[in-house]
Image (cartoon, rainbow, N blue to C red):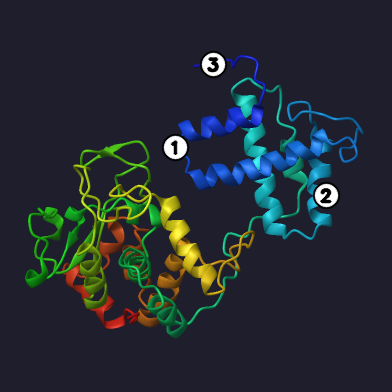
Amino acid sequence: MAAEQPADIEDSVGYFLQDMTYHGKSDRTRSAYERVLRAFESFVENPSQNPAGTAKSVDEAGHRDCMAWIHTLRNRDVSSSTIATYASYLHRFYAYMAQVGAFDSNPMALVMEEMDEKIDSNPARREISVAQMREFARQIHHPLDHALVIALLKTGMRVGELCNLDLRDVSLSEDRALTGVSNRPALDGRGPSIYVDSEPSVGSISNGEQRTASNKRKRSTVVPVDDELETVLLRWLAIRPDTTSPADPLFVGTASGWGERLTPDAVHHIVTGHAESAGWYRAGGDREENVTPHYFRHFFTTHLRDRTGDRGIVKYLRGDVGGDIIDTYTHNWGDRVRETYESNIYSLI
């Protein structure tokens, strides 16, 4: 089926960003695109900067305008990986607008072929020891903020997966069990655990509630809960606001959005606020410098893999593998995961 031809568009960047919303992209992703695309828009609209010496709109820009913008980034000593990322944003914008019939062509296609810069998919990150992370966590006193940080550090979950957790996904020890909550059958007999589903996606209805985040696991995963995480979760649940959601979200707002399921953007704001206080985050910093919720997934992976030497179990806990990895181990997979996890997980409180 041919793409629907859009009517005359006054704001091409705004049109693209709105379509990103329809495609379920997060607020942070849209904000990142908007920042880059508006910067390029300002560049081509400034006659003193673009090669033709005349003001242009983004739909009038050609490949030389795109190359000139990339050149200005190089002259500002922007890192190669960041330049490649910005170029990919502009390339995606033009490719999409050409695909829907708003633009005649994609001037970034040739630029991308000739660029030497590449996105660093495995950048060097800030080195933080377990002792330093423990001290960081101990400085967080609000039960919600503390629970979010400890849960991310102890499980390696993605922030969207954390936000999608419901009370039914959490099983605690018998003497601390949540009253009135019917857990998932997959948690029966597994001890204190968290069930991370592979299914929820942005806009879908799960457990009676429309979701604002997506899980990206290749398979649903049962992650052990150790004594520390159980204590932190119980402290949070003791003050957790009531919610009107039929899904009973585990993590809900305690300020704006009182009692509503937390979004990835809200968790990102909480985590980076504490990281900024610790000197681990600054606005405009890159992945090598800043500590964000995703950094905690990196921290979990690095330290647990180094301690266990078992990449298979770490990949399972991260949700990065299908059922085939389990088949390479004993039939008593659940006990093996818990034993390995509890013997090696770091202490944070």
User: Which of the two discs, 2 and 3, labels the residue nearer the N terminus?
Assistant: 3
Quadrant location of residue 125? bottom right
Vertically, is 155 above or below 228?
above
Residue in front for this viewpoint, 68 or 332: 68
Tag 2: residue type?
A: His
Residue wearing tag 1? 24
Residue closer to the observer: 88 or 146: 146
What's the distance in space between the residues labelled 2 and 1, CA to CA?
32 Å
> What is the spatial separation of the Cα atoms under label 2 and label 3, in whole angstroms?
35 Å
Instruction: Specify which label sits upstream in the sequence, 3 or 1.
Output: 3
Seen in the picture, residue 255 relative to 301 is either above or below; the reply is above
In the rendered structure, which amino acid carries the disc numbered 1? Gly
Percent across and percent down for residue 339 are 22, 78
Left or right position of 154 against 127: left
Q: In the drawing, what numbered circle is on residue 4?
A: 3
Q: Residue furthest front?
A: 255
Residue 71: give its label.
2
| Residue under the point 65% across and 50% down | 85
